[in-house]
Image: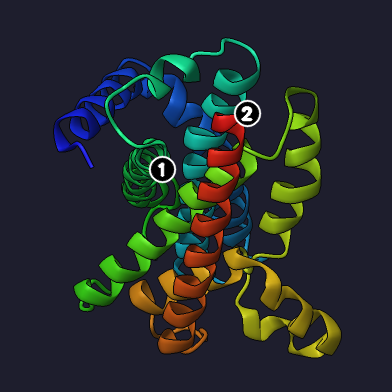
Amino acid sequence: MNWKTFYALLARDGHVARRNLLPTLLQNLLQPLLFTFVFGKVMTSSGIMPAAYKSMLLPGVMAISMVLAGVQAVAMPLITEFQFTREIEDRLLAPIEIGWLAVEKVVAGMIQAMVAGLVVIPAAWLIMGSGVKLDFGRPVEFLLVALLVALFSSAGGLALGCSVGQTQIGLMFSLVLAPMMMFGCAYYPWSALETFPILHIAVLVNPLVYASEGLRGALVPQVPHMNTLVVIGALAAIDLGLLFLGLKKFHQKAVS
């Protein structure tokens, strides 16, 4: 491990992210905030949804924003660098082991995911107005869950970026990310699926379920949510699995 090279690569990615901050935020936050406006503002103001729905919705929107930010921050550049610009060849010449190049991308993706998640809280609060009741009395639990969600998004982006071709980007969003968001318990709690027993169990393979339920338990413990220890254990296992797969795929593509 060459720490000087690692920090230099991280600083370079940070500089690129800062230069593209506004387009990146718009790309990652536009869809979640539109859902927030429709469901959290329009439907609650018209009386179709209760005002308490705002508090339940916000952690799910935060989870989606973090996942989108982390996946796009890692997967999209990797797809381009491996298959179009071949910029990855310059990175591979750096005085650092191949595996640490992938770890640096994961860390950079985690930072972007955390920023996107934190930006959502005041933005959604402004959109929905009064009635949002978040509880920040569990800072350690919130930070741990947020870090696990950020690692899931960036490690998932690493695995996808090393597995998907340029011509399959649209397929990735339509077959992977879109179903993940709709069945990720972001817009409703996991307990709401109890009337659909098969779906109630099937969605447990979706990592976004644990991300949404974990943030919901940390920020709005007054609403129904999954057990926090179960969430932390599931996210840790998913993170390790995706990180192992992503590092393996990255090494295979880099060597080839």
Contact flag, marks 2 and 1 (Cβ < 8 Å):
no
Left or right side of 16 for 136: left
Q: Which residue is the site of mark 1? A: 99
Q: Nearer the viewer, residue 224 or 4?
A: 4
- The secondary structure type at the circle numbered 1 is helix
Residue at 33% x, 44% y: name it.
Answer: 107
Residue at 45% x, 20% y: name it.
Answer: 23
Furthest-left residue in this view = 4
**Mark 2 vs mark 1: in front:** 2
Label 2 crowding class (10 Å Cα cut-off): few <14, some 14-19, many 20+?
few
Left or right side of 83 for 139: left
Question: How many numbered circles does the render carry?
Answer: 2
Q: Nearer the viewer, residue 82 or 114?
A: 82
Q: Nearer the viewer, residue 152 or 215?
A: 152
Q: Which residue is the site of mark 2? A: 256
The N terminus sits in image quarter: top left
Q: Is residue 138 above or below residue 164?
A: below
Q: Nearer the viewer, residue 229 or 80?
A: 80
Residue at 34% x, 24% y: name it.
Answer: 17
Residue 32: tell me if it is visible: no
Label 1 crowding class (10 Å Cα cut-off): few <14, some 14-19, many 20+?
some
Label for residue 10?
none
Alpha carbons under labels 2 and 1: distance apart: 14 Å
Q: Quadrant of residue 92?
A: top left
Q: Amino acid at mark 1?
A: Gly
